[in-house]
Structure formats: structure tokens, C-alpha cells
Image (tube, rainbow, N blue to C red):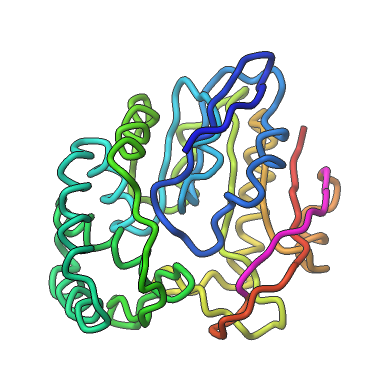
């Protein structure tokens, strides 16, 4: 649940994310926390929120957390507002859980895809905890279509959700694209960006979190955006694939390679891959 570490001379508790998320950074968190600027004590932005591993690992006085996935943000908001209810709803789903129940719940989730309440948040959390490889993927209709994966999910306990609520106290949550933070950030702020990665083989991209994939052109636009942030005096940390095209986009930045274990396709296959940590400080 919690692991202590030193950050800027102070003891910080790393809180584990409450949600299972493909591409999450929990297995790299001890590396990532060391990249938080040593003199940083200001505002933190994470516009590709996902599981929020780095946010939960730091003691940020003021945080702005956002993502284009409205169900993900609804889950965070619901845990922040009523963790007890979310826990109760998750327990109810666990009691009924079976292969058939997974698909019944998925059907109900899709039927209510325009609703954003505690019940839908609990469905979302339960589905990604039991889905194949923790993937959240939608089809062209915006319907969640990932098959079942885990029969025995490791759901968050109530104490965990209460700790998450505490962490979220000074965090502002929003469903927006990453570039919307441009009007908010100012010199001295710290921004961490963990975008969808380019496919390792140029074509395999099973982790599709929204209807539109994050294309190669999207990666180019993101790099331009990061350079704009840098010119404003914002400290920027980026995670991405260790491939030639990404290294070229961030030429002139500090680039370090680190190893991570990832699912790289729709097959149940985990391999060690190299990822980049890119920063301007």
C-alpha cells in the first residue's frame, strides 16, 4: 500500500494506484520519483493521467490531473468523493463475478456509456481489474470491447481507497486533451507526460484507450507542445518508447533509457523493453 522514500529531504509515502492500467508506471516508480526536480515545491500537472503512478508517489501541494478518457476521470472523482460507496459496489461485483458476469457488466457499462456516476465508476474500475492485461480499449462506437482476463482480481481495499481520497484532496481533475494545460502552466511548474507509446514493430497497437489512436503525427505535435512548455520555463518530464523517431523528436533534451516489462501485443506476452525518460532540467 505505502512505501517510504526520501524526496527533497522529506519522507514521502508512495501510494499504489487504485486502478489497473495497461502501460502504467508502477514498475518504474522508484526510477521516476528520482526525476522529480530536487528543488520543486510548486504545482504539478499530469495530463495523460492513466493510473497516476507518479502523482501518487509524490507529495504535491497542488496537482492538476487530466485525461481524455471521461470514465477514467469519473473513477478518480468518485473515489475522491465517496470511497466507501465505491468499495461497497466493488464488493457487490466481486460476489457475483464469473465469466458470464463480466460480459453482462461490460454490456451494462456500454449501455450507460454517457453516464458518469458512482455506479458507472465502480463498473469501470471492476472491468479494468478483470480485463485482459488491464487494457481499456473501445471500438469505433466508443464501446468498451476488451475480453475477460483475470478471474481473481486484486481489487483495492477500503483503506487503500481512503488513502487515495486523501492524496486527491488538493488535486483538480478534468477531462480534456493534454494541450489544454498550456493556458494554465507557468514558469516553475512541473509537468509529467506519459502518452500512448508508438508501436514497437510499427503496426502492433493493442492498447487503444480512445476511439482515435495516438498517431505518429500526434507524437510530433506532442514534441512541439513540450518545447513550448520548456520555453515558458516549465520543467518537463516525458516517458516514451526507446525508438529512433522519438529520440529525434527530442534532440537537445536530456534522454535516459530504462528497462521495463510490458505487454506488447494482444497476445499474453510480457517482454523487457527499453523506455526513455526525457527531460529539460
Q: Is residue 259 magenta?
A: yes
x then y, percent, for residue 110: 20, 74
What residue lies at 48% left-to-right and 72% top-to-bottom?
133
Q: With respect to residue 51, does 136 lie above or below?
A: below
Q: With respect to residue 281, does 248 lie above or below?
A: below
Q: Nearer the viewer, residue 133 or 281?
A: 133
Q: Is residue 268 magenta?
A: no
The answer to which image quadrant residue 126 occupies is bottom left
x then y, percent, for residue 57: 55, 34
Q: How many marks?
A: 0
What residue lies at 61% left-to-right and 56% top-to-bottom?
222
The prevailing secondary structure element of the residues shown in magenta is: strand
Q: Is residue 100 left or right of residue 218?
A: left
Find the magenta span and give its range.
Answer: 254-263
Q: Nearer the viewer, residue 194 or 90?
A: 90
x then y, percent, for residue 156: 35, 48
Q: Residue furthest top?
A: 9
Q: Is residue 88 left or right of residue 272?
A: left
x then y, percent, for residue 89: 16, 54
The answer to which image quadrant residue 272 occupies is bottom right
Amino acid at each position: 500500500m505505502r512505501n517510504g522514500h526520501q524526496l527533497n529531504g522529506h519522507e514521502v509515502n508512495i501510494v499504489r494506484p487504485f486502478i489497473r492500467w495497461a502501460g502504467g508506471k508502477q514498475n518504474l516508480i522508484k526510477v521516476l520519483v528520482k526525476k522529480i526536480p530536487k528543488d520543486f515545491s510548486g504545482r504539478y500537472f499530469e495530463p495523460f493521467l492513466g493510473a497516476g503512478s507518479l502523482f501518487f508517489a509524490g507529495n504535491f501541494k497542488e496537482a492538476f490531473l487530466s485525461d481524455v478518457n471521461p470514465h477514467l476521470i469519473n473513477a478518480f472523482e468518485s473515489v475522491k468523493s465517496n470511497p466507501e460507496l465505491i468499495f461497497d459496489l466493488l464488493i457487490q461485483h466481486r460476489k457475483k463475478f464469473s465469466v458470464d458476469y463480466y460480459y453482462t457488466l461490460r454490456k451494462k457499462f456500454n449501455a450507460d456509456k454517457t453516464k458518469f456516476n458512482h455506479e458507472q465508476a465502480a463498473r469501470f474500475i471492476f472491468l479494468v481489474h478483470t480485463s485482459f492485461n488491464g487494457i481499456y480499449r473501445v471500438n469505433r462506437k466508443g464501446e468498451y470491447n476488451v475480453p475477460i482476463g483475470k478471474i481473481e482480481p486484486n481489487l483495492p481495499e477500503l483503506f487503500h481507497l481512503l488513502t487515495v481520497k486523501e492524496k486527491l484532496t488538493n488535486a483538480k481533475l478534468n477531462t480534456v486533451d493534454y494541450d489544454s494545460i498550456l493556458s494554465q502552466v507557468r514558469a516553475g511548474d512541473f509537468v509529467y507526460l506519459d502518452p500512448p507509446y508508438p508501436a514497437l514493430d510499427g503496426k502492433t497497437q493493442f492498447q487503444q484507450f480512445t476511439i482515435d489512436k495516438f498517431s505518429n503525427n500526434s507524437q510530433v505535435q506532442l514534441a512541439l507542445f513540450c518545447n513550448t512548455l520548456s520555453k515558458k520555463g516549465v520543467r518537463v518530464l516525458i516517458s516514451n518508447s526507446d525508438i529512433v523517431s522519438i529520440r529525434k523528436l527530442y534532440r537537445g533534451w536530456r534522454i535516459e533509457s530504462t528497462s521495463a516489462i510490458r505487454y506488447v501485443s494482444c497476445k499474453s506476452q510480457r517482454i523487457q523493453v527499453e523506455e526513455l525518460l526525457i527531460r529539460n532540467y
